[in-house]
Amino acid sequence: MSQPAASTADRHPMPGMMVYNVKLGMWIFLLSEVMFFTALIGSYIILRFAHPDHFAEPGAVLNVPLTAFNTFVLICSSVSMVKAYAAITQGDQKGLKFWLLVTILLGTFFVGVQVYEYIILAQEGFVPMAELYGVAHEIEGAALYGATFYTMTGFHGTHVTIGILCMWFVLYRAWQGKYSADNYGGVEIMGLYWHFVDLVWIILFTIVYLI
Amino acid sequence: MDAHAHAHEMPWIRRYVFSTDHKIIAIQFLLMSLFFLVVGGLLAAMIRWQLGFPSEPMPGGMLLPDEMMAPTPAGAIMLPEFYNSLVTMHGTIMIFFAIMPLLVGVFGNLLIPLQIGADDMAFPRLNMASFWMAFPAGLLMLVSFAVEGGAAGAGWTSYAPLSASGEYTGVYLGQQLWLISLTILGFASLAGAVNYITTIINMRAPGMTWFRMPLATWALFITAILILLAIPILAGALIMLLFDQTIGTGFFLPASDGEPLLWQHLFWFFGHPEVYILILPAMGITSDVLANGARKPVFGYHAMVLAIVSIAFLSWIVWGHHMFQSGMNPMLGTTFMITTMVIAVPSAIKVFNWLGTIYKGNIHLHTPMLHALGFVSMFIIGGLSGVFMASTPVDVYIHDTYFIVAHIHYVLFGGSLFAIFAGVTFWYPKMFGRLMNEKWGRIHFWLTLILYNLVFWPMHSIGIQGHMRRIYDPTQYEFLQPLQPINQFITVCVFALVAVQAIYALNFIISIWKGKKAGNNPWHANSLEWTVPSPPPHGNFELVPIVYRGPYEYSAPDVEEDYWLQDTPPPSETAAPALEPQPVAD
């Protein structure tokens, strides 16, 4: 072959996606998270269509105003996450730490309200099986309605909790001065995860509480 | 070289037990899954004893506890509950702890960084975590045999409601351990998948364009995407089933108006991509080995890649063909029948391209080549019986019979496992620095091929005659009694088949120390893993390799040898290379 096998363009390093590994890895991981929540949400939709009589009207069992406020808090935490990211891209260490702390507090508030909501609901008998939980009676249809409700919101709450724990770690690293205007990958992927969890909640809030 | 020297300073436990080196992790996965392959094979032998000689004392049965085998003066007789556990655990262990880690864990780890010219995976520690989740998950699965009530007994598909309540199977804790073990394994698979995808996208060597990647890496890349998207569906379903058993939910329980069919939909929405997770890497390995054995470029490289991609895409829209008899809407059955038939097209493209690859080749029948040819021929049989089952009218008749058992073993044993034998033998030097014994390798291949067909071919026939898939004692039905001689024949052949595998095991173990030294490139292959020593040092490549051509430049007219390594500069440029190799960045 007279023609060189490799053209000039091919001789440069393969740049891949022009995205550093950890960020690409996080995006790929989030794809799998999408599928996980798809399994839970899809099951909810199928069960609800199959047995609409087991599912109460919006607001009949669940406290919609409280959760609406909680949703607002979670969205605010996404804003503060963006502020933390914006701060470190400018090299603002103090801003990074402040906004990370705000995000942690807002996230913790969200989980706290969710736990409070669970306790109230359980006392009202909104549990899948009364005898297992020491409740006098269970609300009609709770074996399906309650099961889907607790599974979906519970797994979301677990994701928020894991996010908060990771955020403490990021904050600890920020305190050590590990991030800078040139090196903020850790904050960025934390933000990706946090916004994803936020987005999932918006979908869950809509289909579980509003529709 | 720095990285290499560094590796020797690490304590033994960091180098071989909690290693982050992808090659060591590949060997760990290999040893783990070969162990589970043996366990799964022994379970199969016990199943076959019961089918061949129903309720006769099993040799060695006295060694097992009374919960599994009923002791009688003549010897121990298998209990039906234990038989259910055996069927369940044989399927589970073979699919999740033997074939899947062999294909994805072993070859994914070993080949991806070496074939794309990377020093390691993108996330080495995550890679280590992947193995150290998979291995305990496997142990947990084994432990479930010892708990009260025995191991899970609702089939490897664990259909609800049978699996959703211990009242139906008598298995409580065993079924829960089954669910937990598979969930942990799911995390391990996800960690691996994220790693593989990131590594392939971001860490290819200069010049390693997408269409210069070996087909093994291509197949593993697409497989990783399937794992990434399918495993979370399984995880969701497993967790819901676990909740049904433990915390009183009613997702799949008709008693609470749950939907048992929902489990089947979720399981097979995962399960059908899983089927291709178990065969795509085998196809990739076969393509590499066939081109090497035939000393010819792979016929239709681009078509091969596109066929892999389209099989992967189609695998998402065919799950209903497992459910023709489930009471699903018959209109859906027709839809799924058509989509399933469509998969035959890319599969046939691959088969014809393999035939095109060996056509008029200078064929070297080394052991890996024999196994690869075995893969192609067995896959054709398994693929054709798949078309039978895909058509609903035929499936109505053969559903849940031994015809299905024959089909799955033709694609999983005849397909995947032959490709695994091919791959392990072919890349053995890159793991242990030596070659496996060629003579014993061939003897093992021929004995396995013959015995394997004697075992599984008759299953088509007894399946057509109505032999059920999961049945404890076939002689209880009068119409199955005339088939008993065939059952006994199969059982005897299974024992021989299992025994013959000892040849491979011995060959594998002895060759680690006594095998012929391999050198860099014992098979005269082209891809990047053959440019480095066997086994490659920590960090793999001394200099970042520069890739000039595709991986299948066998018998190229421009060079004297019949192979042309991917990183050999073209003749016109050897005098004055335009681009100097760069040292490996640490």
Image: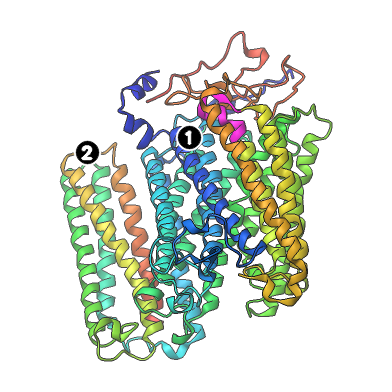
Does B192 appear above or below B575? below
Which residue is nearer to you in this view: B284 or A65? B284
Q: Chain of mark 1?
A: B
Q: Main secondary structure of the magenta part?
A: helix
Q: Chain of mark 2?
A: A
**Residue B475: percent from left, percent from top:** 69, 72
Q: Amino acid at mark 2?
A: Lys
Does A22 appear above or below B366? below
Q: Amino acid at mark 1?
A: Met
Report whether residue A75 is seen.
Answer: yes
Which residue is nearer to you in this view: B202 or B241? B241
Which residue shows up at 71% across the image and 61% down it? B487
Rendered image: mark on residue B64: none
Q: Which image quadrant: the C terminus of chain B?
A: top left
- For the record, the magenta segment spans B424-436
Left or right, B89 with respect to A173, comes to right
Q: Residue furthest top?
A: B575
- Residue under label 1, please give it: B203
Q: Secondary structure at mark 2?
A: loop
Mark 1 to mark 2 CA distance (whole Å)? 25 Å
Which residue shows up at 51% across the image and 85% down it? A50
* Residue A57 in magenta stretch: no
Eye-nearest disc, 1 or 2: 1
Q: Are marks 1 and 2 in contact (CB under 8 Å)?
A: no
Which residue is nearer to you in this view: A57 or B281? B281
User: What's the coloring here?
Assistant: rainbow
**Residue B174: percent from left, percent from top:** 42, 66
**Residue B448: percent from left, percent from top:** 69, 43
- Residue under label 2, please give it: A178
Which residue is nearer to you in this view: B102 or B152? B152
